[in-house]
Amino acid sequence: MDRIPVEVLLENVLPRLSSASILAVSATSKFFYHVVDDEVLWQTLTLRDFKLPLHSTFRQIGWRRLYSKLWDPIVYTWGEGSNARLGHPAVNQPNYYGRYRNEPLPRELVSLRGKGIVDIIAGGYSFHVLDRNGTVWMWGMMSDWLANDEACEEPTHVNLPVPIRSISCGRVQAMALGKDGRVFQWLNIRNPMEIVLDSASPVVQIAAGWGFSAALTADGEVFYIPEGHHRVGFSTVNYGTEGENDDGSNAEQPKLPKKEIHEHVTLTGLLASTHMSFGKHNFGVKFTRIACGEHFMIALTNAGAVFKFDTSTALSFMNPLLSEHLAKFGFHTGEQDVSSSERIIGHISAFFREFAAYNREGTVFWGDREFNADTSPIMFSELQSGICQISIGDWHKGAITADGKLLTWGEPSAGALGHTTAKIKPTLVKGELANKFVFSIGFGGWHSGVLAVDLGA
């Protein structure tokens, strides 16, 4: 095997083996020990074996260490406790409003021990998590004003017909992308709906916002999905015999109502409609990432160009005159000052009224929905390198570093900040997370959640 080129080993041979077999190969010689100690290889194995979400691919280092710890991640939640949104047991004391106390520091959600959680997303009043088997769990309330909406006091399965690849949450709605490519949306876990897009291209990403959602196809089509009317009070899903058990026998699966979506935009269509207004830039050929907030959407192209759309209505989303190229966000391919592909914007995040764009070096460019083509991004000295995920609540924000540390800033937000006072600059959260490796975060509303592994275990 030592005569096989290293590139072939890493790309074609080793990824086909189990982790135990790979470790056995590494023990045969110093040569194979160093070959196996490759970050890209362990990234491939981690994504294969644990089904981590899309944003996890943005991490550049620490994959082997993460792989060894991911069999039993720890779920922490803290912040505002109303609506049972933190998932912790109720407190039977009259001085705690609504029986659910606020948590000023990260607290383990014990009920999810051993569940293999790989992603956590916060909504306006709830959390959703995804486990490595593709099951979605939810707790809290989807909304605090919809009639008859009741809180899920502990993690509860969302009634979906197929294993799920990724999830996304807006203020009062959530979405899921199935491993079979189907898209689902719900405002209550008892009443999910299947979204059918007018496209032959497979869906590669979903994004839920405030009042709308969006889906991105492999061809770069961005579909606008209204929040819908499948609210509480509608009949729960019916069950049929769609699908099979592992042994081939019929399995009862929910047959969901369906909604067809046609409204979409493409980068080529946008540029053709507004060619003169954007000037001469290398925009690329298609959109590759999307992120949604309140009445706006951020879209990223394969060349690293960042666009902002008005999503107040489907008509405003489709109107090219209401879209803007945020020219001062990041570096684009083709620019003279771009010396490395690592500097090009490769990921975006959004929630409520703010958004972030960041590159593979981990440099973060910050903005809000009022930004336009002439607005320069906000830059934090603490977020100039090594950042691999951003999450945004109403008034607090969070970032995780490549070495698994959590930084937060903004308002205390009933404890969601993890600090007792407001922080203008990103500040390290310690306490329970001091000796933990944080690999996923979900901030929303006035609450925070993270997934972490114990470095000392």
Image (cartoon, rainbow, N blue to C red):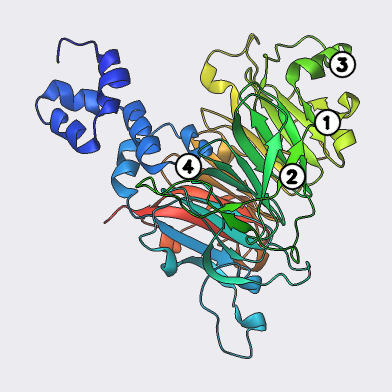
Query: Foreground: 89 or 224?
Result: 224
Q: Secondary structure at mark 4?
A: strand
> Which of the numbered marks, if any, corresponds to residue 372?
1
Q: Is residue 352 left or right of residue 27?
A: right
Residue beneath disc 2 = 293
Instruction: Write down the quadrant of residue 96 in the picture.
Output: bottom right
Q: Secondary structure at mark 1?
A: loop
Q: Secondary structure at mark 2?
A: loop
Compare marks 3 and 2 and give the one earlier in the sequence. 3
Compare marks 3 and 4 and give the one earlier in the sequence. 3
Q: Is residue 162 left or right of residue 234?
A: left
Compare marks 1 and 4 and give the one earlier in the sequence. 1
Q: Residue at x 37, y 30 (%)?
A: 44
Residue 414: x, y in percent? 65, 68
Please, is residue 93 above or below residue 376 in the view?
below
Residue 222: x, y in percent? 72, 29
Cα–Cα gap, marks 2 and 4: 23 Å
Compare marks 2 and 4 and give the one earlier in the sequence. 2
Instruction: Write down the quadrant of residue 115 in the picture.
Output: bottom left
Residue beneath disc 3 = 273
Query: Foreground: 376 or 35?
Result: 35
Q: Can you see residue 315?
A: yes
- Neighbor class of circle 2 (other Cα within 10 Å; few <14, some 14-19, many 20+) is many
